[in-house]
Amino acid sequence: MSQEPRQNLQLPRHVAIIMDGNGRWATERGLPRAEGHRAGVEKIRSVLDFMGEHAVEYVTIYAFSTENWNRPQDEVSGIMAILREVIEEEAQALHERGVRIIHLGRTDRLGADLKEAVSNAQELTKDNKRMTLSVAFDYGGRSEILEAVRGLMRDSISPEDLDEDLLSQYLYTAGIPDPDLIIRTGGEHRLSNFLLWQSAYSEFFTTPIPWPELGPQEIEEAFQSYHSRKRRFGAVDTGG
Ligand code: IPE
Ligand code: IPE
Ligand code: MG
């Protein structure tokens, strides 16, 4: 869904987070990388609370990319196990707080138990309105666009009828506004295949702090930085 230019925004309506740096955080402490992923998951709850307090309506977190399958098998299966556990354990609490949970990504390569946990969580929370939490795993922006194109072809959409809004409706994020602010922890300055289509005019904030160590002060800083940005969406700033 393409976004109307909205200037002088006080707060981001949609914050997307690339939760990076778990592995390095663990390695620096002499711990196995899996401990970093475990610590990373613990961080999510407090960050969601912060977002809720700041009236953020949409939070999207990047948990596992289509390229992350290239990691050692034991790390991959560890992450998948943590994901299933967390979704099963947290769905009810999130539901009680009015959070709608959505998965962004492929489902065909996920284990049956994880798929079931996702579908139960989505079903349980589907009518919630306070916040939408999108959890991106086995997610890749290119794969998402490719899948959308396949869908359009399957539906025999003619080239003349195709526009940006229609293509957006075939993405995993159909119905979700584009992210206003993308935060990346762990020090890298790249998207790593995250929300390629949706990030066209997102503001970008990076911090060297690894995800397990992120504190409210860094999110505050990200929000402050966001406040100070002039979002022009390609137009000319007329002041005011
Ligand atoms: C992010 O942390 C989590 C995933 C990509 C699954 P990393 O595991 O990439 O941590 P670093 O970047 O190696 O420190
Ligand atoms: C991006 O982190 C993916 C997630 C946070 C899930 P990566 O660690 O996979 O990204 P690169 O390899 O540094 O680009
Ligand atoms: Mg990384």
Image (tube, helix red, strand yellow):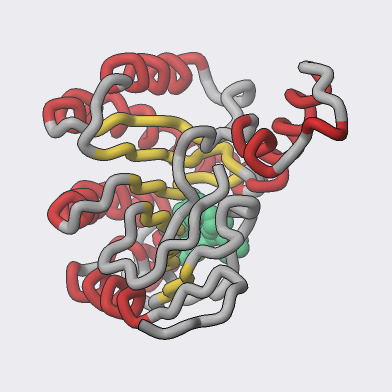
User: On screen, 2 above or below 50?
Assistant: above
Which residue: 48% across, 41% down? 136
Instruction: Name, please, the residue furthest toward the bottom.
Output: 239
User: On screen, 168 above or below 11?
Assistant: above
Q: Is residue 23 visible?
A: no
Which residue: 72% across, 31% down? 147
Which quadrant of the structure image shows residue 153? top right
Quadrant of the frame with the N terminus: top right
Q: Is residue 198 visible?
A: yes
**Residue sitting nearer the eye, 155 or 7:** 7
Ligand 2 located in image quadrant:
bottom right
**Residue sitting nearer the eye, 141 or 68:** 141
Residue 144, given in percent of the width and then of the height, sits at 66, 38
Which residue: 22% across, 27% down? 89
Quadrant of the frame with the C terminus: bottom left
Which quadrant of the structure image shows residue 167? top right
Residue 157, given in percent of the width and then of the height, sits at 81, 23
Residue 104, given in percent of the width and then of the height, sits at 51, 35
